[in-house]
Image (cartoon, rainbow, N blue to C red):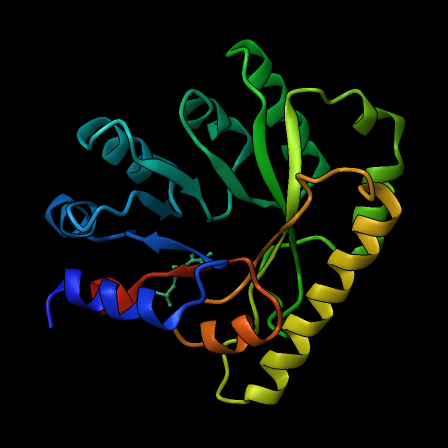
Amino acid sequence: MGIAEKFKKLQQEVPPTVKIVAVSKTHPIDSIMQVYYSDYKVFGESKVQELVEKYEELPTDIEWHMIGHLQSNKVKYITPFVSLIHSVDSFKLLKVINKQAKKHKRVIDCLLQFHIAKEQTKYGLSFEETDEILQSEEFEMLHNVRIRGLMGMATFTEDTALIRSEFEYLNSCHKLIKGKFFSDKEFFNELSMGMSNDYKIAIDCGTTMIRVGSTIFGERE
Ligand SMILES: *Cc1c(COP(=O)(O)O)cnc(C)c1O
């Protein structure tokens, strides 16, 4: 099956209310264009340099999402064009994004990345840290970022019960935070969870955005 067909098959499996972010990291321009020509324009990358290079080479109507760990000193390279940053994992990073967005007269949509997996290595905030950020006066002053919701990555495991419990936990955090800080804000409505190996579970658990790479583009090197 070609990339366009794989993409179409995925689209048929996913409810129309769930947005697919086609994760194109490591894959060449041609592969991305096969999805683009199927009239789909939402792509995700996890490294700043690769994201910038692809943005410069590809059509300008692509909606680019940053999904990987973002270093504060690299924010400036993506602020002119990025549509959504999924991976805000510290208050410091959020403040830098705000500052850069202000320079470009933009308001940048962001998700707060939660640490929900068992692995030590995955970045992300806890519920308590997030609660503290959102309560702070400093957060109130950030007018150039808009928090659209939460993102999380489940443990990489065959244990589907564990994955499910992690996604359910993230969904419950989303509800609590929405109730406490964003109850009158329509825009706080995104839950980015689910990748190639677990997007079906994520759909059951109420995801609104799945980030899928290898199912569409094939295995990465
Ligand atoms: C690479 C990546 C994905 C996609 O992974 P696949 O297993 O190829 O679907 C999703 N989210 C993040 C944060 C990634 O880095």
Picture residue at 46% right of the left edge, 71% below the top: 199
Residue sitting nearer the eye, 19 or 192: 19
Q: Is residue 189 visible?
A: yes
| Residue 65 position within the rendered picture, expressed as x and y whole percent measured from the top left | 42, 41
**Left or right of residue 143: residue 102:** left
Q: In which quadrant will I find the C terminus?
A: bottom left
**Left or right of residue 35: residue 19:** right
Q: Please, is residue 138 above or below residue 39 in the view?
A: above
Q: Please, is residue 57 above or below residue 199 in the view?
A: above
Picture residue at 52% right of the left edge, 37% below the top: 71
Q: Is residue 221 visible?
A: no
| Quarter occupied by residue 213 | bottom left
| Residue 57 position within the rendered picture, expressed as x and y whole percent measured from the top left | 18, 30
| Quarter occupied by residue 174 | bottom right
| Residue 184 position within the rendered picture, expressed as x and y whole percent measured from the top left | 81, 38
**Left or right of residue 133: residue 111:** left
Picture residue at 38% right of the left edge, 43% below the top: 47
